[in-house]
Image (spheres, grey):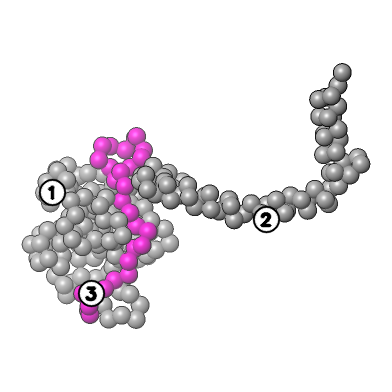
Amino acid sequence: LYRRSLDALIMAEGGHRQAETPFYLYYWDDRDGPFWRGWWVTPDEVGCTQYVAFARGHRVAPTECDGEWESAYPIPGVDPFRNGNPRQPYAQMAIFPSSDAADPPGALAIVGLRGTRGERAAGVYNVLADHPHHHGASRPVYKRARPLRGGEERAIRRANLTLRQRWYEAVELALAYSRCKPALFSWLERAQARLDVYGPDGVARQRDRDEFEADFAT
């Protein structure tokens, strides 16, 4: 039922599908050879000859495949049947545990597909516990249960930042502040000059005068 054929493998054209098309996330073993082994995201059914994304290899869980996902579409200008059938990478695609407490245990969220041809496959996927294609507890079959809500992708990414990523983010913010600080102070000085805040009747001069009188009042 789930056998694949290289000649039958075609791209999943999301624009020609209905909104209710189901999507599945699952692991395919090497029953058809090592070329097919890995995690797949496909429409319609498990083992579908069309696919949206594929992470080659034998990772235990799809959450371990960051940076390894590739789309069903050939790299422009490259023969798709040459050099191991190269495909366009999904550079931002990642899978994380869902951060919504309302989702069932084990639910995963596919993020990073916005603006790509596989965008409609993004969302929260629930475990299909009784699916016959299970490969053990760590490699169940998942089915897309709902799309991502507004702002949910950002929240999921932030919730799953590693300690190193948080450190890099803090360093980037500090560097950005240090680069912007001179320009910010320069703009502030120009704004104060235009508003004449330090003139004889300026608000800054009045504030300084009031503080001085308060400090030395008898």
Q: Quadrant of residue 47?
A: bottom left
Q: CA distance from mark 2 to mark 3?
A: 50 Å
Disc 2: CA contacts within 10 A as few (<14), some (14-19) or many (>=20): few
Question: What is the three-letter code of the residue carrying label 1?
Answer: His
Label 1: how many residues lie within 10 Å, few (<14), some (14-19) or many (20+)? some
Q: Main secondary structure of the magenta part?
A: loop
Q: Which residues are magenta?
A: 81-108
What is the spatial separation of the Cα atoms under label 2 and label 1, in whole angstroms?
58 Å
Q: Residue pushed farthest right? A: 200
Residue 85, above or below 50: below
Tell which tag, 2 or 3, sits nearer the viewer: 2
* Closest to the observer, 189 or 145: 189
Q: Earlier in the sequence, mark 2 or mark 1?
A: 1
Secondary structure category for the residue under label 2: helix
* Residue picked out by circle 1: 134
Q: Secondary structure at mark 1?
A: loop
- Callout 3 secondary element: loop
- x and y, in percent, of residue 25 in the image: 24, 53
User: Can residue 147 be seen here?
Assistant: no
**For discs 2 and 1, the disc positioned in front in the rendered view:** 2
Direction top: furthest residue: 218
Q: Is residue 83 magenta?
A: yes
Residue at left offset 32%, top offset 70% = 88
Disc 2 residue type? Ala
Q: Earlier in the sequence, mark 1 or mark 3?
A: 3
Residue 71 x %, y % = 30, 66
Q: Which mark is residue 85?
A: 3
When asked about the image quadrant of residue 215, the answer is top right
Residue beneath label 2, please?
A: 183
Is 181 displayed left or right of 87 in the figure? right
Is residue 149 left or right of 130 when viewed as pictured?
right
Report if residue 192 lies within the magenta region.
Answer: no
